[in-house]
Image: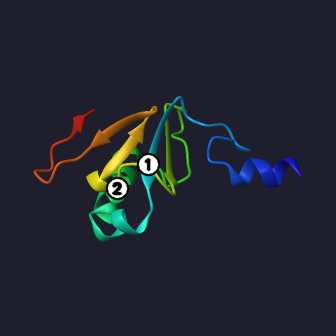
Amino acid sequence: MVEGVASFYSSLSLTPKGRNTIRLCGNIVDRFSRLDSVQAAFVAELGIKMGQASHDRVFQLGQTPCTDLCDQADAAIIDDKAVIAPATGSASSS
């Protein structure tokens, strides 16, 4: 029972998480945007796969069904703060 609940909610985990969480939205709007390239950039930079924490447990990379930022696709939630990547490729925080 506990395992079912823990695996359903993204805020719960059965394995240790990183101190800093990075969540990318996997909904249809982001999939039509640059989700694949944004995800690949995080994976390459951190050296971990989606759903994993870095070896030093500093970062946790994951996906969420909604960030509430569909109108600003290519957004991520980093430590509960929205980070939006403008079309220019540079990032800004809100």
The residue drawn where x is 53% and y is 32% is: 56
Q: How far apart in space, not on screen, are marks 2 and 1 (Cα)?
A: 7 Å
Determine contact: label 2, label 1, CB under 8 Å. yes
* Residue found at the very far right of the displayed protein: 1
Q: Which residue bears the numbered disc 2? A: 70
The answer to whether any part of residue 74 appears in the image is yes
Residue 48 drawn at (x, y percent): 47, 50
Relative to 81, say whether 26 is above or below: below
Residue 60 drawn at (x, y percent): 51, 41
Residue 63 drawn at (x, y percent): 50, 54
Query: What secondary structure is marked by label 2?
Result: helix
Query: What secondary structure is marked by label 1?
Result: loop
Q: Which residue bears the numbered disc 1? A: 67
* Type of amino acid at the residue the image marks with label 1: Thr
Crowding at label 1, few (<14), some or many (≥20) Cα neighbours within 10 Å?
A: some
The residue drawn where x is 28% and y is 32% is: 94
- Residue 39's label in the rendered image is none
The residue drawn where x is 40% and y is 69% is: 28
Q: Is residue 8 left or right of residue 87?
A: right
Q: Is residue 92 left or right of residue 62?
A: left
Q: Is residue 33 left or right of residue 24?
A: left
Crowding at label 2, few (<14), some or many (≥20) Cα neighbours within 10 Å?
A: some
